[in-house]
Structures are given as structure tokens and as C-alpha cells.
Image: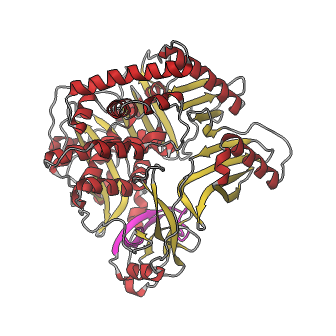
Amino acid sequence: MDQYIQQALAGNEIAIRHIMTMHKPRLLAKAYTYMKNKQDAEDIVQETFIKAFGALAQLKDPKYFATWLYKILMRESFSAMKKKKRTELSEAEIMEQLLLLDQENSEDYSELHNAIESLKKDYQLAIVLHYFYDFKVFEIAEMLGKPSNTIKMHLHRGRKAIRLKLEETMRKPLQQKDVKRMLKEQLLDLAKQYGNIPTHYELELENYLEDGISSYMWKGQSKDEVVFMRLDEKGRLDDFAKPPVKEGPPITEERKLEIAQRQLREQYPEALSYYTLIEQHKKESSTSFKYGQVVSGFPLDGFYCRIEVTDPGEIIQFTYTGYMENPPEMPKKLYPTERILNTLYEGDWLLGAASFNKKYDTVQESGIYAIYESERLTQAYDAVTGKPLLDFDDESTPSYEPFPKVEALPKKIKIEEIIGINEEWEQYEEVRMCMDETYEELNWRPKGWQDSEGKTYDHYMKSKFENRIKAKVDKRTKRLDSFIWFAEIEGEAKLSEEECLQIAAQFIQTYYPEYTPYLQIEVKDEDEIEENRAFFRFVVHKDGFFVENEFFHMNICKKTGAILMFSAANIAVESIEKFEPKAIKPIKEMLPLKDLKVQLEWDRVYGKTEQDECEMRLIYRIQMTDGAFIKGINAESGEIIYSLI
């Protein structure tokens, strides 16, 4: 998930959509438990995503993105309930949510965690909400229905009690700075041993969080020379990735498995009694082993350890996510799978259009295809009752208006001029671990800028995204694909939505005029209009079809009229022109579909158990017989469009 968050920070629409798709179902489920109303839950989740992506650069560690999302969801739900004059959340409810958000799964807490556990519940709750989840004092006061001064007192007394408890445990007077210094030195030495870091690598990231998690990153001279490591509160490997350096003859697959299992045993010996080897995948020069917790033949969602071993026998990747001490039991009776397929066939199918590339196995060539889609095809079903887990029937359908009639502006040639970069900025090279070979990435920062000292994750993120301008240019056509400003732009203007729309439309008309006959603007609701920024989506439209996920996205500053973010459609205009579906078949002629199966799996529910940080439930998903992701049905050929990627 980390790579998608990094791409989302750079304004990558595909990454943003992927993140929303991954997290939306669980956010909706949790919002519904608060609001008790489906439409209100939808509104809460939408507002959560808007605020999350608007402040994504403030996220200190991508590992905690899910926690961060839930925190925003809690705040938005609480605010909405206050507006509806519902009662405040009880302390029990909030502690339940904090346990839900906790990403660690360990009964052996560090000395600090033991000290926190010993606090009075009032102090413990204030400390955890404030320091672990970054809620402000007044927000905690509102949640608990107590005065702000009371919360301040709880924080003060809680900190004092923690200090005394640590001194008692360690049997000597203690300064907090001494504890942090000793812990950091030991963890860094341990990380170096785990990673076998080459001498020419330099430490670029050294970050320590309140919950004992520490992260490190070393970089060599090339973009491929990067070692990343994360340790848990006990100094055990939590996440690790490095480039291969060991050379030698290849070892057997059995020997690789022994190396992987030894590493797991050294780090988490207790996990082996819960884990089973569920996947062994041979790559070009390495083998990936995945251990998972299996119940009744089905792996538990989210509980696994993945280890990659090179052919010469070097571990280059290790990711551990824990196990459940009290796993669920198999239900005595399951809902018949044939009824799930009947629900799919008897349900509504929508005719639309989407662009595909050759990664979809039944797509002969990249382009736009007319497809039939069903929400039931991507739905998850309760395996005991057969009921859909989410109801999408009330989702509002967006409305559109024609592309505004505007005149093109004088066309600028240089990329800097198009983006609006003046002489106060300079271009620089940025070393990245990976890059889309289709595009060239360009970066600018203010002249004379100097990076301040520091290796924390917060500092690292600021060095990458604060006072920066990033752009992508198509290597083949040299055309600007996207750009985003990570900088404050001040001004005195107060432009209206209509004036900002004029700016956005003129930009597209000037630099992408061949697209404008096929664009329509998505109409915004009143609550989507912001005071200082204006967002617009110009969607690709052809012969009555709106092409899914193909649009121009723009963000205009109302203070200056500057374009802060721009992203072009991915599809070539030639593909739009070529799209002329002529032989649309009725959906009933294509059903039933071949090669479909109803897959049974354990799904993680962020619920409320005392021993475990989550619950599990059995669900059904409709898939291809080979487990491929299904997008829809080609409306002309009747073939299922799917992808194994």
C-alpha cells in the first residue's frame, strides 16, 4: 500500500482511486455503525476521503494510513452526530475504536506500554487519544463530554505517572531523553545487523514512533540501492526490503524454504504454530514464500508473513502482519453458492464504457470497450445468510454539462511556462526507487533551498513534498501529462467557481483541443464547493457513453487563478475516435457466464473482540475459476473482461 500512497501524494489519480476502492467498503461499514443511516454513512466516507487526500502529506508513516483514515472517519462521524443532536460517544465506544485501530498484535508490551496500561482509565484514554492518535485537547473534551481543563489535567498527571512507573521498573532515576537515546542506539545497531548494510550506503531515514515502531532507510549511489526496514517495539523485523547483493550458485528450492523458515522462527517463533505455508512462487531470480494462518482450509485475511529469498540464498524481503490467538470457527451451515450466482444473473446490469490495456487477458488491443457491469459482480456476500455486505442502490448518479465554449489562449512552449514556474524556482534531479518508464518525472524547488538536518519520517516527507513542484511528461510525445504544486500560493483575488471553470476550460482548449469535443464537465453539489480552491472533472464522453475513469482533473486556486493540479486523461484521442460500438448484444443472451465460481474466504472485520484486534467473517466473492479480477462483460463479444494482475 505504501507505493500507492506515495503515488497519491504526487497526484496520481489511479493510485487515489485504488486506495479509495480498497478502503471504502470497511469505512462504509464502520460509518454505518455510527450513523445508523446508509446515506449519512456515504456522506461521512466521502468527506473522510476528501479531507484525507487533502492533507495526505501530513501522514508520518504510510503503515498507519488505515489508522489515519479511521481517525478522520471518527472525527467526521462525531461531528455529524453532534449536528443531529445525538448523544456523545461513550468512553467505552472510543476505547473500542482505539483497540480497533491498533495495528500491533502483541501481548508482551514494551516498558512504556506497560506503564500506560497501569494508568487510571481517564489518564490512559487521554494519553492514547492525544499522543497515539493526535487528537487535540478540545476534540478529546468534546468526545468525552468533559471540560478541556480536565483533559489537560489528565494528560499532565498521566505523563507524571508514566515517568514514575518507568523509574520503578528500571530501578533508577530516569530522564525521558535518556530512555529515547538508549533505545534508538540499540534499535539502529540491530537494524544494521539485520540488513547487512553496505558501507557506502548512507542513512536517510531514522524514525521512531510513540508506540515503539522504528523505521530506517539507507540509500546507495543508484536509485536501486535502497534498503528499507521497520522494527516493532521488541526490535523484531516488521517490514524489510533490500536489493540483492549476494552472488553465487543457485541453491535448491528446499534450501530456500529452510532459510525462509529459519528467519521466521528467529523473529517470531510463536507464529509457526499458527502459520501454514500457503504460497510458493518462483520468480526469475528468487522465490517468494507466504505463510498464513489457515482455518478450515481458508487463510485468514490480513494475517501472514511473506519472505523472498534469492537464488544464491539471500533474504531480500520480509513482511510480517501477525496472527490471531483465538481464530474463528467454521459455521455449521453455509448459504448455497448457486443462489449467489442466480442473484448475479437476475440482478440489474448497466451498459457503459471503459478503457482497457493488454493486462486484461481478454482484451486484444488497448482501447475503449462497451461493457456490461453489475454491482453484484464485485459485491461481497455473507457466507451464512447470503446477504450482500453493502448496498449500493442509493448511490447518486452524477450529472454532466457540455464542455464550456471558450477560446484558446496563446500557446506556451516550455513546460515551466505552461505550469507557471518563474525564475525563483530551479529544476533538480530526484532519486526514486521506481519509475514508470512511459513518463519522465520533473521536479522543481525554490532557488537556494537547503534541506534542514534530520532523518525522521516527518522530515523525509517534507523534503520530498514541501515547497516542491512535480510534473510528468510523456517520453514519446514530450507532452505534459500531469503536475502538482506542493507549495502555498498567496493572493488577494476571490475568484468565483465560474471564473475558475473558465481558466480550467481554456487550459484544456489550448493544450488538448482534440479532446474537447469528447469532454463533459461533472456537475458539483453545493457542499463540494470550497472557499479557496475549485476542483473540476472533465469526463470523456462518446456517442452516449461516459468512459469510466477517463477524465481531466484540475484544481484552481481562487486566490490567484493559478492551476495547482492538473491530470490528463490516460486514453489517446485516437482510441476515442475509434470507439464505435455497433453490435451491442442484450445481456440476457450472454448469461449464464462460463468459468465463474463463488469463492469462500475469511474477511477481516474491524470489530469488537477483547482478545483480538479484529473479527473475522466468512464471505463469498464471485471470481473466475483461476481467481482473476473481473471487470465486466464485453457488450459486443460476450467475453468476460478480467485480469490476473
For residue 350, above or below residue 450: below
Coloring scheme used: secondary structure
Residue 626 seen anywhere in this rendered image of the structure: yes
Residue in the foreground of this view, choosing between 637 and 78: 78
Report the residue at 55% width, 17% height from top.
Answer: 171
For residue 574, above or below residue 152: below
Residue in the foreground of this view, choosing between 10 and 2: 2
Q: Position of residue 225 (x, y in %)?
A: 66, 33
Q: Quadrant of residue 567?
A: top left
Q: Position of residue 433 (x, y in %)?
A: 58, 37
In the rendered image, residue 374 lying in the magenta stretch gets the answer: yes
Quadrant (top left, top right, bottom left, bottom right) of the C terminus: bottom right
Q: Position of residue 201 (x, y in %)?
A: 67, 25
Residue 645 seen anywhere in this rendered image of the structure: no
Q: Residue furthest bottom?
A: 589
Bounds of the magenta segment: 350-379
Q: Is residue 197 left or right of residue 380?
A: right
In the rendered image, residue 61 lying in the magenta stretch gets the answer: no
Q: Quadrant of residue 490?
A: top left
Residue in the foreground of this view, choosing between 443 and 66: 66
Q: How many marks?
A: 0
Q: Is residue 500 left or right of residue 26?
A: left
Q: Residue furthest right?
A: 249
Q: Position of residue 404 (x, y in %)?
A: 20, 52
Report the residue at 55% width, 31% height from top.
Answer: 215
Report the residue at 47% width, 61% height from top.
Answer: 603
